[in-house]
Image: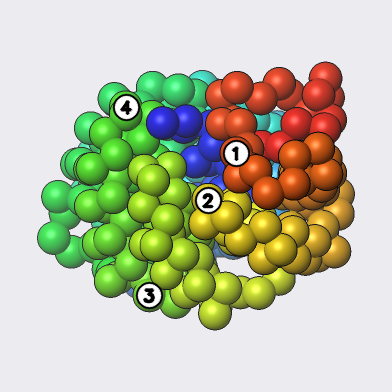
């Protein structure tokens, strides 16, 4: 099972230092409230800066750390490194923040560990990431939203570790916790298709489409599933909608290549079932622009 393909279902990664995953610290003493609020605002500013200029956010975090910025400074560094794609440095910063939070009995510790685990997963160490996600999920005080998002992340780790059954279990649990999150249903559909269960995949992608009919990743997957059901017209329509929605996005570009390849295959051998190659057998788009990537 292709971990890269499973991850391709995401069009936007969970936001770095998601406020959902970082619950507020315990109520501070009256004299510390102003300082805490100032630190929280500075961290929020750093997060916003990282979106447009990761390097500036990293510099801000480094300056802040030199003045004993503590947890917030490390989170600022982690955000900057994450937006820059430096998973190792982001993981290191988040782990430092987690250690500081644990030492201070700060309620954010478990959420920060989840962010560190995400970076561990991004850099390819799925086994360690899974262990860290296990620790996070063992916390009985997690909200449904936090638990659901962490289950999604752990499902990805299971996929990389070639444990489709465990991934499916996590995704089903996430469906119950996040029933209105289209990404949950998209990933569930992708995994079901990869496991050859096209009927279930169809049900899952239908739910994703009920929630979002414009996400090119969902439309791309709808076409992929339709191909498996030999519904070529539906596949072409779904892919066409993905292209129309965001032609320059990875999903839109893949959908466009799939349409070209599908049309060529149908013209070359009318009436013969079409089988698109698995992602692992497809060259990168830059060297094989006409190769469909299901």
Up/down of 269 relative to 95, above or below: below
Residue beneath the point at 56% across and 24% down: 280
Q: Are marks 1 and 3 in contact (CB under 8 Å)?
A: no
Q: Position of residue 98 (x, y in %)?
A: 34, 38
First along the sequence among labels 3 and 2: 3
Graded by Cα atoms within 10 Å as few (under 14), some (14 to 19) or many (20 or more), the crowding at tag 3 reads some
Residue beneath the point at 61% across and 31% down: 277
Whole-number angstrom distance, CA of label 3 to CA of label 2? 25 Å
Residue bearing the label numbered 2: 228
Whole-number angstrom distance, CA of label 2 to CA of label 4? 25 Å
Q: Is residue 78 left or right of residue 54?
A: left
**Quadrant (top left/top right/bottom left/bottom right) for the C terminus:** top right
Residue bearing the label numbered 1: 275
Q: Are marks 2 and 4 in contact (CB under 8 Å)?
A: no
SS state under label 3: loop
Residue bearing the label numbered 4: 161
Whole-number angstrom distance, CA of label 1 to CA of label 3? 32 Å
First along the sequence among labels 4 and 1: 4
Q: Position of residue 130 (x, y in %)?
A: 28, 34
Whole-number angstrom distance, CA of label 4 to CA of label 1? 26 Å
């Amino acid at each position: 099972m292709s971990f890269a393909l499973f991850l391709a279902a995401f069009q936007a990664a969970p936001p770095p230092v998601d406020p959902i995953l970082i619950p507020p610290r315990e109520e501070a003493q009256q004299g510390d409230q102003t300082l805490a609020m100032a630190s929280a605002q500075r961290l929020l500013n750093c997060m916003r800066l990282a979106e447009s200029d990761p390097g500036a956010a990293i510099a801000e975090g480094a300056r802040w750390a030199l003045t004993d910025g503590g947890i917030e400074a490390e989170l600022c560094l982690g955000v900057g490194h994450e937006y820059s794609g430096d998973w190792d440095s982001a993981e290191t910063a988040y782990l430092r923040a987690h250690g500081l939070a644990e030492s201070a009995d700060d309620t954010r510790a478990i959420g920060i560990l989840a962010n560190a685990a995400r970076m561990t997963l991004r850099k390819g160490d799925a086994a360690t990431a899974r262990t860290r996600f296990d620790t996070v999920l063992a916390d009985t005080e997690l909200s449904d939203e936090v638990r659901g998002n962490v289950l999604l992340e752990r499902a990805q780790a299971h996929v990389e570790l070639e444990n489709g059954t465990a991934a499916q279990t996590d995704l089903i649990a996430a469906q119950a916790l996040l029933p209105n999150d289209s990404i949950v249903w998209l990933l569930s559909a992708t995994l079901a298709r990869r496991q050859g269960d096209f009927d279930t995949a169809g049900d899952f992608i239908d739910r994703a489409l009920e929630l979002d009919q414009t996400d090119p990743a969902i439309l791309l997957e709808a076409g992929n599933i339709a191909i498996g059901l030999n519904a070529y017209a539906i596949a072409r329509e779904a892919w066409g909608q993905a292209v129309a929605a965001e032609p320059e996005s990875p999903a839109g570009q893949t959908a466009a290549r799939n349409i070209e390849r599908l049309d060529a295959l149908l013209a070359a051998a009318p009436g013969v079932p079409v089988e698109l190659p698995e992602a692992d057998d497809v060259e990168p788009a830059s060297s094989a622009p006409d190769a469909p990537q299901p």
